[in-house]
Amino acid sequence: MNGKVYLVGAGPGDPGLITAKGLACIEQADVLIYDYLASPLLLRHAPAKAEKIYVGKQGGDHTLSQEGINDLIVEKSRQGLMVTRLKGGDPFIFGRGGEEAEELVAAGIPFEIVPGVTSAIAAPAYAGIPLTHRKFTATVAFVTGHEDPTKESSNVDWTALATGIGTVVFFMGVKNLPHIVEKLTAHGRPSHTPVALIRWGTTTAQQTVTGTLATIVEAVQAAGLKAPAIIVVGEVVSLRDTLKWFETRPLLGKRIVVTRAREQASDLVQKLTDLGAACLECPTIEVVPPEDWAPLDRALSNLDTFDWLVFTSVNGVNFFFQRLFDTGRDLRDLPRIKTAVIGPATQKRLLDWGVISDIVPESFRAESVVAAFEKEDVAGKRVLLPRALEARPVLPEELRKMGAKVEEITAYQTIADRSAAGRLIKDLETGDVDMVTFTSSSTVRNFKALLPASRAGELMAGVAVASIGPITSDTARDLGFAVHTEASAYTIDGLREAITAYYGKSELTN
């Protein structure tokens, strides 16, 4: 029995521009067949068991011919699988989606077309160029800049494009730019007509070069701009200086390594991406359960004997409460215990579980919790401290000096994650890293362990380091890293602000 095929437009590069239906097709796919221009971030939404097959075409280097792709789609669907064919932009605008659909019809396989945001619209929009505008033009045309080489003659009406269309958008035309310019001017388009080329539109690598038909070839050569790029010809290009917004983001094009554990990285990645950075996720640690649950289970069975419950991280909250519920207990087992936390993120996560913290220190480190407890009478009080196996001893030691009876329990542990080591070293070797971020001492130690000892200095030459706070910074310096910027507030937002300030630009409010 045949499965079903969804020909899905992945959008122009920004993964946020995929449609809701397109995303659902990825999430439900048994097989994901994807192109070169489809954002790799979209692949994360596919089920873990889904087969992911890359069939990209880049600069004449074809992983699989179009005929081979057609056969692959048919073959997988005949296995009774749901196949999501993920194509850059829109499948029916120079995406050969029509050809693939014809093959499915011929094979008797059911399919659906899920339109995508085409780069012809999105890239100019991200460059601040409206394709139509009442003051300039009411007509727009999309043209391939690279016609089928097997055709005997061109079916592009250059006279109509030059004199009858206000805005002309060319796909895949960088290599043929001189030819396009020559044809337009020869058929009546004024040489002073504004032109823009937008490379990697809607992504953090976006680059725009502008000029006129008379100057654009030289300007593109001077900028070294290469494919993939969209060419926009028309008076609307003159609006770019007024309307550009995406390329004014303070971190645009900065390549920043995020070393947080994979399950925690999304917040920092999103905040930096929103400011234009290209984030390279390289988790150096993995947060896992303790080797033995018995100590925490004993503490949970005796919660009524504790006076205080202190959390030093979001992970501590998560593992504590998950284990509480996994062992058949709930919030009714915490009727009289007071709570203290380090940092607003930990406070918020505790509230997510339905508990309001009694103590939230002014700054976000163990020493601040100690200072906050000086206002409390903790002599003889029992304090439960569920936290990481490798946690600093400052907090329990100082509480014991105040007379508290502190029971430290391992609620979780961090282990080294080497899954991204190969890619990290390659990116450092090729100079594709501008900054590395550290959010804890463990991320520093494990990052250092990923680097070949004899080459660490060489690989980090010219790479800035951003730290979330002084403890992390001290660890970094002890391990031989120069720290270029440090958050004044020891939070993800504080780290983002420090990175933005380091690059010398203020954040935008849009």
Image (tube, helix red, strand yellow):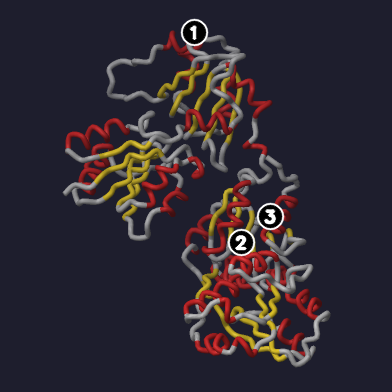
Image point 28% across, 24% down: which residue? 150
Q: Can residue 413 be seen in this view?
A: no
Where's residue 30, x and y in %? 30, 53
Asked which secondary structure carries label 1, the reply is helix
Tag in front: 2 or 3: 3
Real-space Cα separation, disc 2 to disc 3, in angstroms = 26 Å
Label placed on residue 458: 2
Look at the numbered discs 2 and 3 and tell me whether their residues touch, using CB distance below 8 Å: no
Where's residue 90, x and y in %? 40, 34
Which of pointers 2 and 1 lies earlier in the amino acid sequence?
A: 1
Crowding at label 3, few (<14), some or many (≥20) Cα neighbours within 10 Å? many
Look at the numbered discs 2 and 1 and tell me whether their residues touch, using CB distance below 8 Å: no
Asked which quadrant contains residue 408, the reply is: bottom right
Three-letter amino acid code of the residue under disc 3: Arg
Tag in front: 3 or 1: 3
Real-space Cα separation, disc 3 to disc 1, in angstroms = 49 Å
In the visual, does 7 lie left or right of 344? left
Of 84 and 192, the residue lying toward us: 84
In the visual, does 121 lie left or right of 2? right
Crowding at label 1, few (<14), some or many (≥20) Cα neighbours within 10 Å? some
Which of pointers 2 and 3 lies earlier in the amino acid sequence?
A: 2
Tag in front: 2 or 1: 1
Image point 71% across, 42% down: which residue? 508
Question: Seen from this angle, which residue lies furthest right?
Answer: 375
Crowding at label 2, few (<14), some or many (≥20) Cα neighbours within 10 Å? few
Three-letter amino acid code of the residue under disc 1: Thr
Three-letter amino acid code of the residue under disc 2: Glu
Label placed on residue 135: none
Name the residue beneath numbered marker 3.
496
Q: In which quarter of the image is the C terminus?
A: top right
Name the residue beneath numbered marker 1.
163
Of 343 and 183, the residue lying toward us: 343
